[in-house]
Image (cartoon, rainbow, N blue to C red):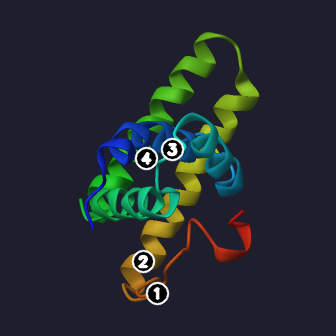
Amino acid sequence: MPLSEVDLAAFPRAYTATLDGHAPADIRETLAKEFPAANAERIFNHIQRAFERAADRGLKAVHGWCIESSRDLYRKMTEVGDYEGALRAVKQVAALAETIADRQEDPTATAGQLIDLFPAEAKG
């Protein structure tokens, strides 16, 4: 079902809050205050679909983006002397490389696994 005008207005706020790591209950509360006529469940469904579309862009592209982002973080952290953070970036790339190798050995290892971003028990 398409988003209403109110849902469309609230969508960016909920999407950003989700990316920022806010809990679904907190997002629902914010939507209820800022957009009382918005349908939070419909908005969450659209957020989930937006993430699914992003995932359809291809695993190699996602891996490449992760590696390049980590490289950029490493560069920035070494520039400011944050060597602990730089080491974390290196460890993330190493873990990603291991994940890529594991997936190449068994491409079905993660097939069919779904993550519910907005679980029912978290709904307020």
Residue identified by numbered label 3? 14
Secondary structure beneath label 4:
helix
Residue identified by numbered label 1? 109
Do the residues bearing badges 3 and 4 touch, measured as CB atoms within 8 Å? Answer: no
Q: Residue at x 59, y 11 (%)?
A: 79
Residue identified by numbered label 4? 66
Label 4 is placed on what type of residue?
A: Cys
Secondary structure beneath label 3:
helix
Q: Nearer the viewer, residue 54 or 73?
A: 54
Quick one: quadrant of the C terminus?
Answer: bottom right
Number of residues whose C-alpha sits closer than 10 Å to that of mark 3, classed few (under 14), some (14–19) or many (20 or more) = many
Q: Indicate which disc, 3 or 1, sits on the residue closer to the N terminus.
A: 3
Quick one: quadrant of the N terminus?
Answer: bottom left
Do the residues bearing badges 3 and 1 touch, measured as CB atoms within 8 Å? Answer: no
Compared to residue 71, the image places residue 102 above or below, namely: below
Residue identified by numbered label 2? 103
Compared to residue 100, the image places residue 31 above or below, namely: above
| Image quadrant assignment for residue 95 | bottom right
Q: Compute the Cα span from label 1 to label 2.
A: 7 Å
Depth check, mark 3 against mark 1: the one in front is 3
Q: Compute the Cα span from label 3 to label 1.
A: 32 Å
Number of residues whose C-alpha sits closer than 10 Å to that of mark 1, classed few (under 14), some (14–19) or many (20 or more) = few
Do the residues bearing badges 1 and 2 touch, measured as CB atoms within 8 Å? Answer: yes
Q: Indicate which disc, 3 or 4, sits on the residue closer to the N terminus.
A: 3
